[in-house]
Image (cartoon, grey):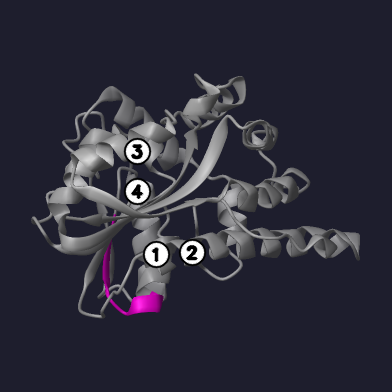
Amino acid sequence: MTATQDSPVLGSLYQHSVAEYWNAERNPVNLRLGEVDGIYHHHYGIGAVDWTVLDGPAETREQRTIAELHRLESAQADLLMSHLGPVKPSDRLMDAGSGRGGSSLVANERFGCRVDGVSISESQVAFANDQAERRGVADKVRFHFKNMLDTGFETGAFQAIWNNESTMYVELGLLFAEHARLLRRGGRYVTITGCYNDAYGLPSRAVSEINAHYICDIHPRSTYFREMAANRLVPVSVVDLTSATIPYWELRAKSTLATGIEQAFLDAYKGGSFQYLLIAADRI
């Protein structure tokens, strides 16, 4: 099932185009990595690369490289989870822009709590719900065809919410207003995102290439903090992960799963026009 243009979930023609993109997406760099352990992430990785995966028998090099890329993206998800603050099994969390569901499944396994994922891609929602069924956690992890700007969930329902590389598809003021409504007082919001560096000036050519590739609009770093302040989200931790993600991109560029966008990421990160940040904020 795919999104229709008159769906009430999709608020604009742009959202419709994004939904259609992700409904049709079958990129091996997302699917092959998820096949390693059944956790399908739609984000990038962090940490030092084990470059020995490129050594040894050529016939198993791709398998070794895929496993290493998946290890790096799993490390990124684990880092995000470690910033969600105290979470009890009785708490409820929301994964905003949940993709094929990897982060939600990681959160449930780590905290034992209820997790709701939301996505405007009906095919991703169906895939993620199937994964929850296969892992026997569908009673606690559910994915919904909903718009993260207007979820319809009840006010104050969530202890924590995160966006893992999904904020560049929406207006931050609208997003943070909805998150502030959904979070209980003292709840935690975390995002890991690429943002362009205001100190550099306007978006660089490499950043513009990334925007065109993913049909997104990468925000300047300053907009995150301005819109958080306007919506009762007070940062408690900001971690610059730029240097930590470069090795992932260097390995991916050498893999059979390269999509052609790898050099733009490397140029943007190394040139200083683009940053990879983790921001954790409390709802006051």
Q: Quick one: 82 or 7, which is closer to the camera?
A: 82
Eye-nearest disc, 2 or 3: 3
Residue at 23 percent across and 47 percent down: it is 146
For badge 1, the amino acid type reads His
Q: Which residue is mark 2?
A: 79
Q: Which residue is mark 4?
A: 97
The answer to whether one can see residue 3 in this image is no
- Give the quarter of the figure containing the N terminus: top left
Q: Is residue 139 above or below residue 260?
A: below
For badge 4, the amino acid type reads Gly
Q: Which residue is mark 1?
A: 83
Question: Within the magenta stretch, is there residue 102?
Answer: no
- The span shown in magenta is 109-117
**Mark 1 touches mark 3? (CB < 8 Å):** no
Spatial CA distance of label 4 from label 2 is 18 Å
**Marks 4 and 3, the one that precedes in the sequence:** 4
Count neighbours of disc 1 (C-alpha within 10 A) and say few if under 14, some if 14 to 19, many if 20 or more: many
Spatial CA distance of label 1 from label 4 is 18 Å
